Image (cartoon, rainbow, N blue to C red):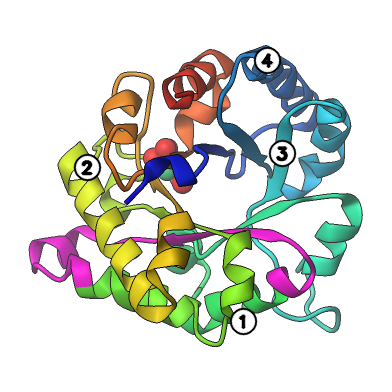
Amino acid sequence: MDKSLRPAVIAGNWKMNKLRGEARALVEGILPALAKADCRVIACVPFTDLETVLEAARGSRLHIGAQNCHWAQSGAYTGEISAPMLAEMGVEYVILGHSERRQYFGETDATVNARLKAALASGLRVILCVGETLEQRQRGITAPVCSMQVRSALYEIPEAAMGDLLIAYEPVWAIGTGKTATAAQAGEVCGLIRDTVADLYSGRVAERLCIQYGGSMNPGNAAELLDQPDIDGGLIGGASLRAEEFAQIIQAASR
Ligand code: PEP
């Protein structure tokens, strides 16, 4: 498959970190790296930082995303944020199905699918996260687990919407643990995800789909991971909180 059809995409997932002043400083620290970047860069920040980072990034090449959205447009869902609320603010991306939401907040394949439909309907672009647990890897069921997560999330998603979707392969055992999948392991599962999308839609859709790797990506391992034919970018947690490290990953992705 022709990798040049897919622009590299580096996204930071700040998780539940950064007060507003810190968020502004981090964006200001990242912006210089964007001048020479040959990839798309996204910062997915806490809801409370969105307004601050949207303003700090205005006129720059930094794209802004949230880390979740609800499946309903509005209603009695205390504490939740809807896709239209994000879109109205000027937010462009949203992460859905992150393993921390699956693990701690009861996220299921069905709710990921519902959120995905709501996000796309509001014009948001989605970074859909899938990945196996350590136990699933040890049992040798990584391929069916990831394939099923992709199939469930994309249930009733029309081909026309696929241009607004990225998939991040994030092995749960590699997130925030310092353990990275080897480049070969990560590349293999990203290839399998692409095959699943080809099977669901077409080879043409699959070859245009950006697939990121996420799980302890850092300046030391980014180049090797990004060199894999089916890895088009990274979703980065810990290292995205430090401007210097994030800038080095952006540099590694600029090809
Ligand atoms: C993540 O939260 O999506 C992630 C990949 O985290 P980390 O880079 O810290 O493993």
Q: Residues within 10 Å of mark 3 (few under 14, many from 20)?
A: some
Image-based side of 252 in relation to 65, left or right: left
The reply to whether discs 3 and 1 touch (Cβ–Cβ < 8 Å) is: no
| Residue type highlighted by circle 1 | Ala
Which stretch appears magenta? 119-143
| Residue type highlighted by circle 4 | Ala
Give coordinates of residue 188: x percent, y percent: 20, 53
Image-based side of 153 in relation to 27, left or right: left
Q: Comparing marks 2 and 3, which lies closer to the viewer?
A: 3
- Which label was assigned to residue 63? 3
Give coordinates of residue 39: x percent, y percent: 56, 31
Q: Can you identify the residue that label 4 sits on? A: 35
Q: Which is nearer the N-term, disc 4 or disc 1? A: 4
The correct choice, above or below, for 210 with respect to 147 in the image is above
- The CA span between labels 4 and 3 is 14 Å
Give whichever of 212, 140 is nearer the camera. Answer: 212
Image-based side of 131 in relation to 17, left or right: left
| Residue type highlighted by circle 2 | Ala
The correct choice, above or below, for 103 with respect to 169 in the image is below
- Which label was assigned to residue 114? 1
| Residue type highlighted by circle 3 | His
Q: In the image, what residue occupies the spot 86% across and 27% down? A: 59
Q: In the image, what residue occupies the spot 45% across and 27% down? A: 253
Q: Which is nearer the N-term, disc 1 or disc 2? A: 1
Q: Comparing marks 3 and 1, which lies closer to the viewer?
A: 3
Q: Residues within 10 Å of mark 4 (few under 14, many from 20)?
A: few
